[in-house]
Image (cartoon, rainbow, N blue to C red):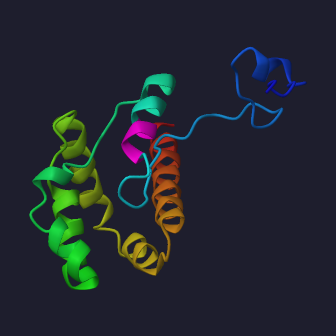
Amino acid sequence: MSSPVNPNPAAAAGEVRIDAEPRPLPRHIAIEGPIGVGKTTLARRLALQLQYPLLLEPAAENPFLDRFYLQGRRHALPTQLFFLLVSPEQHPSLHLRWLAHLAVLLKNPLFRQNLLAAETADDVLAVLDAEEEARSADSQSDQR
């Protein structure tokens, strides 16, 4: 069987182009999904290709994970809190700096309100990005 002809010269050269306009890379990439679908493999490849730090959840160390998969919602909160609070071995200082930064952000009542109103992971990221942009703008205006 012959392989299909690819009219895209970039793809033929091993490059993948999603759109014609270059866009800046996101600051963070989160990957979620069910067990065994290749999340870790994808994360490793993206980190290597984009030269991002790789942060993997310490799933094997989570004492609540098995119970979560057996009984679901009943063990969801402790399972998620474990992942939030336990530093990944790859970059513990980065994780701790982020937790400290998040603690500062949570002091803002409007930020807390917006975060609690977020219904999806994209909503949470949008709230975080908006707060970061506002803090950056405030910082720049303070320097003037």
Q: Quadrant of residue 25?
A: top right
Q: Who's the residue at 45% across and 30% down the image?
A: 45
Assign the magenta stretch its main secondary structure.
helix
Residue 132 x/y as whole percent: 46, 51
Residue sitting at 69 percent across and 18 percent down? Answer: 14
Residue extending farthest to the front is 1
Eyeballing the image, is 89 above or below 109? above
Q: Residue 78 in the image: x percent, y percent? A: 16, 73
- Is residue 1 placed above or below 132 in the rendered structure? above
Residue lying at 87% horizontally and 24% vertically, measured from the top left: 5
Q: Is residue 28 left or right of residue 65?
A: right
Q: Which residues are magenta?
A: 39-43
Left or right: 28 with respect to 73? right
Count the marks: how many?
0
Residue 76 figure quarter:
bottom left
- Residue 73 x/y as whole percent: 27, 83
